[in-house]
Image (cartoon, rainbow, N blue to C red):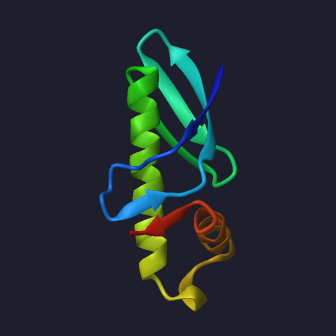
Amino acid sequence: MLITQVDSVPDPELRVFRPIQARIERLDSDNFVATAPEVDIHASGETEGESLFNLGDMIAATFGHFSAVPRDRLGPIPARQLRVLQQHVRRR
């Protein structure tokens, strides 16, 4: 297992101002999974780098989606994920 961090996302409208801890694990010879345990978001890829990039993409997508939903419409888990993401990610 590799411990690393997400310090950017591929969405040019978003900025990571506080890195998000990530873990990358090899699933088998051709697959890796990257996890941001603090926000319970996961992504996979064929390399460590691809899985980390995909994790950044999932973080951006999750932040964008949950930010667009009225707070009273988010369930407890998405609301918690959004609160944590807001401690790390901002719109430019």
Measured along the vertical axis of the image, is residue 85 above or below residue 66? above
Q: Quadrant of residue 77?
A: bottom right
Q: Who's the residue at 63% across and 51% down the image?
A: 40
* Residue 27 percent location from the top left of the image: 54, 19
Measured along the vertical axis of the image, is residue 92 above or below residue 1? below
* Residue 75 percent location from the top left of the image: 62, 77
* Residue 14 percent location from the top left of the image: 39, 62
Measured along the vertical axis of the image, is residue 39 above or below residue 32? below
In the drawing, does residue 44 fall left or right of residue 36? left
* Residue 82 percent location from the top left of the image: 59, 69
Q: Who's the residue at 32% across and 65% down the image?
A: 13
41, 60: nearer the viewer = 60
Q: Quadrant of residue 23?
A: top right
The quadrant of the picture occupied by the N terminus is top right
Q: Who's the residue at 40% across and 37% down the image?
A: 53
In the drawing, does residue 41 fall left or right of residue 38? left
Q: How many marks?
A: 0
Please, which residue is most extreme toward the left here?
A: 12
The quadrant of the picture occupied by the C terminus is bottom left
In the drawing, does residue 24 fall left or right of residue 15? right
